[in-house]
Image: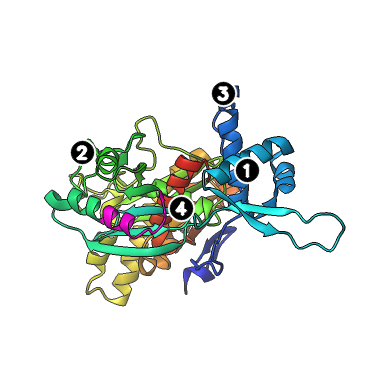
Amino acid sequence: MSASDVHRGSSTIESSHTPTNGRSFGPGRALRQGAKVLPEHARGHNRSLVLQTLFHQGAMSRADLSRETGLTRVTISDLVAELIADGFVAEKGVRESTGPGKPAILVDLDRDGHRIVGLDLSGSDTIIGAVLTLDGDIVVRREIAVPAADALVEAVVGLARDLVADSHAPVLGIGVGTPGVVDDRGVILTAPNLGWAGFDLEGELRRDLGLPVLVANDANAAVLAEYTFGAATDDVLLVKVGRGVGSGLLAGGQPLRGARFAAGEIGHVTVGTDGGPLCVCGKVGCLEAWLSAPSLTARLGGASDEEHERILRDAGERLGIALAPVVGALDLPEIVLSGPTELLDGPLIEQTVETLRSRTLAQFHDGVRVRMTTQGQDIVLRGAAVMVLSGQLGVS
């Protein structure tokens, strides 16, 4: 029985699917605002509000924008003129109309006017890079094998440089999703799987390429993609399974990074008192040692069908053990899994739900939804694009 057929009480599992439309946007999002807007910041906020509205709702007239944003028509007219001059908004002709009066001129985000370069360093064997549109669609994609540790930085810079050359439009910025703990300046504080500690990857790329660069943990990037382009709610935890295991968390639509930028680092939480496999960090029994794609794949190699299911259910139970306190503490309604479908979408996800139900307060948490991502293997690349859109245009 597949995970998509399973219902456990009122908790549910939903299988992954591929969006059928090109943009695959979820509902329009309000502009994320972490604090009161000061007068000196009002114009920048209003500019982002216009871009955010066009990003999610598409072409509309200036009068439509005024109604949607609550800004005056004079303010909208000034902002649209400024955004057209900057190359971020374009007029798209007139709206078809059968009524009297002059037809309204439509404006929209100039979706072909700029490109974004995204890099995903989370793969076990490959580094993936792409050129993306402002809609998050991939127009150029490249992969390179993960090189030796002493050649890794040079390979990442070279891949980014090649993608910029292939963009054929001004590059708005470069977004990078990487394993490890990353601070708010793009410094990788620790990434055991890459052998990096205290490495300023953001600064390195910015110096070499002369473009805006944003670097974040891969799971934190992935949850932004699920929120902006997918179906995630405002309160969601996304678990990213690849070379390692990590998670990205949104609360009220706001990313949570933690006091030391390590929020979501569940991969090195010990999930049992019965020992377990040795982890790359040196401890025994870390979640990552059970659940990472290389670890799971190695244990499944040569296993019988019965052993295959037992191994996956064991990993699912360990994941449920790690997630139950998080769900209980934050009252999360949704858990999204991202990683190899053949490993996650089946017995593993089923057991995760069963474990969550047995370890949380049923009255409140039986309805927690556990599902695969809608974004597929490109979730980190698309999340990297959201990072650039947010950082450069205030769009999310």
Q: Which residues are magenta?
A: 159-171
Which residue lies under the disc numbered 3?
Answer: 40
Q: Earlier in the sequence, mark 1 or mark 3?
A: 3
- Mark 1 vs mark 3, CA separation in Å: 19 Å
Q: Check residue 121 in the rendering and tell me which mark sits there, or answer none.
A: none
Residue depth check, mark 1 versus mark 2: number of the one nearer the observer: 1
Answer whether residue 144 is magenta in the image. Answer: no
- Which picture quadrant has residue 169? bottom left
What residue is at 34 percent from the left and 48 percent from the top?
176
| Image height of 159 relative to 31, above or below | below
Which residue lies under the disc numbered 2?
Answer: 197
- Which picture quadrant has residue 190? top left
Nearer to me, 231 or 292: 231
What residue is at 74 percent from the left and 46 percent from the top?
63
What residue is at 39 percent from the left and 38 percent from the top?
263
Which residue lies under the disc numbered 4?
Answer: 114
- Mark 1 vs mark 2, CA separation in Å: 44 Å
> Pointer 2: residues within 10 angstroms few (<14), some, or many (20+)?
some
Across and down, in percent, residue 128 comes to 30, 59
Q: Earlier in the sequence, mark 2 or mark 4?
A: 4
> Pointer 3: residues within 10 angstroms few (<14), some, or many (20+)?
few
Q: Earlier in the sequence, mark 4 or mark 3?
A: 3
Cβ atoms at labels 1 and 2 below 8 Å apart: no
Residue depth check, mark 1 versus mark 3: number of the one nearer the observer: 1
Nearer to me, 359 or 38: 38
Say which amino acid is labelled 4: His
Across and down, in percent, residue 67 comes to 74, 43
Q: Identify the residue at the far right of this view.
A: 100
- Is 14 left, or right, of 276 in this rendering? right
Say which amino acid is labelled 3: Glu
Q: Earlier in the sequence, mark 4 or mark 1?
A: 1
Which residue lies under the disc numbered 1?
Answer: 80
